[in-house]
Image: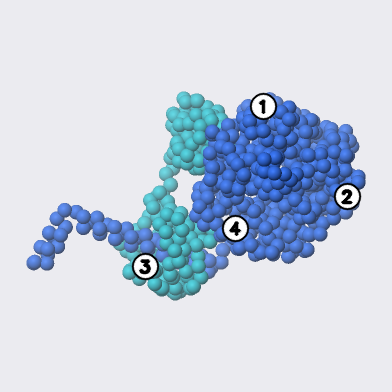
Amino acid sequence: MKYKFQLDKKNFSVEIANNATFHSETNIKINKKNLNLLIGEYDEEETKSFFINNRLYQIEIIKNNEGYPSGIYVNNKYFSASLLKIDSLFYYKHKPISSQKSGISKSFIPGNIKKIFYNVNDKVNEGDIILIHEAMKMENEIRAPKSGIIKKIGVNEGENILANHILFEIE
Amino acid sequence: MQGTPESKEKVLIPNRGVIALDILYSLKSIGLETILLHSPADSLSLPVKLADKSYKFYSSKLEDSYMDLNSIIEKAIELKVNYIHPGYGFLSERPEFSKLCRDNNINFIGPEYEVLKIVENKIELLKTIENLGIKTLNHSNPITSSLESESISHDLKFPLIIKPIKGSGGNGIVIAEYRKDAIDKINALMQRDKYQKNGIFVEEFLPYAHEIEIPFIRDIKGNIIFLPEIESSVQRRFQKIFQESPSVNVSENLRQSMYENSKKIIEKINYMGLGYIEFIVENDNAYFSEINPTFQINTMIPEIHIKSNFIKKQFAISRGELLHNVNGVKIVKPDHKILLMSLMAENPNNNFQPSSGTITEFFHYSTLRDIFKTHLYTRSKVPPIYDPYIGKILSFTQKRETAISNMRNFLDNIIIRGIRTNLNFLKNLLDNESLKQGKTIIDFLNLKHEIFVKPKTEEEILIATALVSAEFHLQNRKKNYKAKLEKMKQPGFFKKIIKQILR
């Protein structure tokens, strides 16, 4: 298999044998350099690590919405990553970021709603502080992503919420 | 102190995490029965396992658990405890709590109500200190309503720091660079009930200054022990992440004058017990800033200087014991250079956004002169409600350079996975040349961006590429395999195969 990856804005072409499982030592070729790879541990949800040239690296993959890698933590160090191409079977194209901003705001971490400054049907401008979301003693000011009318508020003051909870919607 | 198990004195600890562990260890070792109050979210935490007894709050909400002074007192009365140790944070600085304890004949381990009342109101405290002839930074009067642009005095020089009059832990503190900015930020804070009720104030902000704390203990006879100063300039969100003692930025003259001024302050407000006086230091001037009226995260630093347990000392003073071999004022000289760092569950590359979750792997390898204190372990959860604190790392030796390199090596011996941490950030911080030279200033992190993004080597990127592609390859293989299995499950699959074979 041949892949093209971009890491930290540099392009790399990668060649891996089709049947490679890395359960035994396998060579992979990156920009004509050979590296020797072996699985250290491979646990679907939690921990993953590989030996490269007999050195252990612990990794965590960050995926985008389509399930493709968008970044990797190697021993806690972050590298942005994107897959440009797989063989010639199909191309992976970056979706252009839509020019129209989404008016939906979601919580990115569990927490507590400390204060809400607006009501449904209020008019707000982009950047106005709509509510205060406290997580782990840090108060986050959640601002309006765009100007418009508040269509919906998905939380109450004092409510404890999980991550990815819809906070409010602006139209 | 000693006695039969039935006559053991009891202490109630309404706190959590590494704070609770410190208190539990110290007070257990002098023969007290330790009783912990904990929230449901902390049911499986280490302090619960180590306390003699523990009782659960019915809810994990702060106001219904660690901050609920009435139900804590109720429980204390019911259990007939002799002492309450509030730890730090939560209720430790609340005058009402100290008073409630006194009214119910429970010994509150910390300052008296009257002292906490003075310390709590930062503006009143500044005025008291100014009357003693001690320098403070220029500041405004209390602000309790929205402002027009002209209402900030032109005598105050920008940048300004906007602070709540009551409060601790860095909440609500913001920096304003210019007049319009200040007005906007003040008016935003004024929309919040709690800031409007207690008021806020502005003070001149010195980004190139150093933050210096003087730890002290005073007994009922008025004897005082002063400990070597602690510099805690390097902060993120006004919480300390790197502390050292003694500071390289304090001259001997300045040190003496800070001790003298501290003595005046402590005696003026008749402070008894253990505390820290905070100064902002620039160009050999020390401006009084505030008083921290309890032991802190950095309790290990004074412990090493004084060669005894700080919490035990605090407890003894609270019981009315006198300081040993101290008549008047004793100034402890430092034998060691001590560094302390805070390991936090947060992402430094995203505005130090906290991260909660389960720790999948946690390990550290101790050495002789590095101490790592944590309440977490492999598989423990970091709940989203509390401070994202993982642990504190301390390194002490004779020379500053050696302490830094020891600490740096020790950080390499920590493995923590499953949640985002600031471990790499701490490593970069120790690698920073300015830090090595001792140029630690209050605005350090805003001026040193290289700490956040360290350039990566070619090899590192190459290896990351190998890893990301290997992982992707494996995932892809797995998906293909699953797709094949699905195909086989479809009706008629084997018939087709057989047909093909027969043909």
| Chain B representation colour | blue
Q: Nearer the viewer, residue B31 or A40?
A: B31
Q: Which residue is mark 2?
A: B325
Tell if the residue under mark 4 belongs to the same chain as the one under mark 2: yes
- Quarter assignment of residue B123: top right
Chain ID of residue with mark 2 = B
What is the three-letter code of the residue carrying label 2?
A: Asn
Q: Nearer the viewer, residue B131 or A149?
A: B131
Count how many numbered circles sit on residues in the image. Answer: 4
- Quick one: quadrant of the C terminus of chain B? bottom left
Say few, some or many: other residues with alpha carbon within 10 Å of mark 1 (under 14 / 14 to 19 / 20 or more): some
Contact check, label 4 and label 2, Cβ < 8 Å: no
Q: Secondary structure at mark 2?
A: loop
Q: Secondary structure at mark 4?
A: helix
- Quick one: quadrant of the N terminus of chain B? top right
Residue drawn at x 54%, y 34% is B59
- Pick whichever of labels 4 and 2 is earlier in the sequence: 2
- Pick whichever of labels 1 and 2 is earlier in the sequence: 1
In the image, which disc is placed on residue B424?
4
Coordinates of residue A3 in the picture (x, y in percent): 38, 65
Q: Is residue B296 above or below residue B104?
A: below
Q: Nearer the viewer, mark 1 or mark 3?
A: 3
Q: Nearer the viewer, residue A162 or B211?
A: A162
What is the three-letter code of the residue carrying label 3?
A: Thr
Coordinates of residue B113 in the picture (x, y in percent): 76, 31
Q: Nearer the viewer, residue B75 or A25?
A: B75
Chain ID of residue with mark 3 = A
Tell if the residue under mark 1 belongs to the same chain as the one under mark 2: yes
